[in-house]
Image: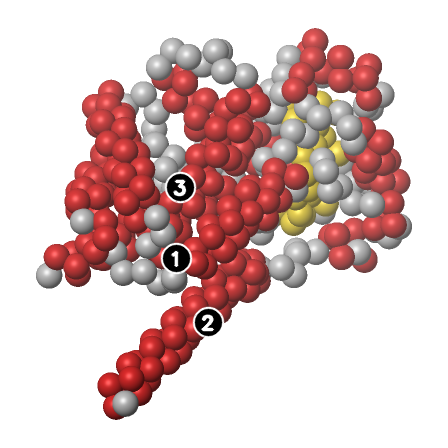
Amino acid sequence: MKKAAVNICRIVLALTFIFSGFVKAVDPLGTQYKIQDYLVAIGLGRMMPDFTTLASSVLLAATEFFLGICLLFAIRRRIVSKLVLAIMVVMTPLTLWLALSNPISDCGCFGDALVLTNWQTLWKNVILLGAAIVVWKWPLEQARLISQSNQWIVMNYSLVFILLFISGKSLYTLPQFDFRPYHIGADIREGWTKMMEGEDSPYTDLFIEQVSDGEDLTEQILNDEGYTFLLVAPHLEQADDSRLDEINQMYEYSLDNGYPFYCLTASGEKAIESWRDLTGAEYAFCQTDDITLKTMIRSNPGLLLLKDGKVIRKWSHNNLPTEEELTTKLEDSELGQLPTETVTTKILWVLTWFVLPLVLLTIADRLWAWTKWVRREKDTVDSDSE
């Protein structure tokens, strides 16, 4: 009974930590924004530079994912159970404070993949704290999935996967899984229309106001029957300027083919003028809420392509379309269509490159352990018969 209870608690903790770490790693900038929200709530908003909060985001995701994998495979059982308990001892009182004072709307423990209220998060952590205490009390009751001699492979492979192939790739390009309302395929026009009719909608804070004359262009852009490029730069003062030629090339392409092109930013006129002087930008600038812009795309700057009010494509400034891809009109180009890569394809990629190798390693390890046991039993029988 005790062994069963320990292993049930260990599986619950493992799956929760793996899921929590993975969704944070998929969207490290989103986790960074949530960390900054916490710092603002406790009065430390300006004391930590952006690179520190971003590093904290990546390390937090990797730590949760790594500990979850260690729990799942029962690796380093004593120390891992202590670390998990320590995390829960810290997080549970923190979420109690969040539930009571409500300084931020949600804790962000599962990113945008699963949004919990502060009270839901508290009860979730109370349950996990109880499970962590059980596992800490009897750590050696955890059943190993892999022998000690091969545990290092699981540990190192998991760290490389989560740091490089998930967090690293998401930072350089865009999150592989997008749980936000501006994901590829999202019909913003439909959501905006529902909001205007009084229905619930995630686009309540969306507004696009032209800087030059203050005109509200939101409905005009969303109702445009064709393609529209939106260059999104929440704060031009912090925008990466290493791809200016590619951005200007995209603007020239839009002019040549008659596609509207707007830059959406939350920066003031002084920052906009500085950006114009730096880049030679001739495209129209529009003011938009900075949180909305950060929700649209995890890149500063980033590029969205709309068609009939629907998100068709999203690009980080690091992987904008090449000159070769811009030789034809969007109507006749692959760029003007929804990507063929689906969520199912992305899940299969994770299963193929992470889950499958670990499953095969576990099977091979168990087979090797079984053959060693068979040989040992055979030697025992032979020695007894002599």
Residue at figure coordinates x 85%, y 21% from the top left: 280
- Residues under labels 3 and 1: Cα distance? 21 Å
Residue 259, disc = none
Q: Is residue 105 above or below residue 179?
A: above
- The part of the image, by quadrant, that contains residue 381 is bottom left
* Viewer-closest of 100 and 94: 94
Examine the rendered structure and indicate whether residue 300 appears above or below residue 15.
above
Q: Quadrant of the N terminus?
A: bottom left
Residue 100 vs residue 359, the one in the foreground: 359
The reply to whether dot 1 and dot 2 touch (C-beta < 8 Å) is no
Residue found at the far top of this picture = 270
Q: Position of residue 185 (x, y in %)?
A: 58, 51
The alpha-carbon separation of the residues under discs 2 and 3 comes to 27 Å
Q: How is the image coloured?
A: secondary structure
Figure disc tally: 3
Q: Upstream in the sequence, badge 2 or badge 3? A: 3
Looking at the image, is 93 positioned above or below residue 381? above
- Can you identify the residue that label 2 sits on? 364
Q: Residue at x 54, y 17 (%)?
A: 49
Of the residues shown, which amino acid type is indicated by label 2? Answer: Ala
Mark 3: secondary structure: helix
Q: CA distance from mark 1 to mark 2?
A: 14 Å
Crowding near the residue tagged with mark 2, few <14, some 14–19, many ≥20 C-alpha atoms within 10 Å: few
What number is the disc on residue 64? 3
Q: Are marks 3 and 1 in contact (CB under 8 Å)?
A: no
Task: Choose the circle earlier in sequence order: 3 or 1.
Answer: 3
Residue identified by numbered label 1: 148
Q: Secondary structure at mark 1?
A: helix
Give the residue type that dot 1 points to.
Answer: Gln
Please, what is the three-letter code of the amino acid marked with disc 3?
A: Glu
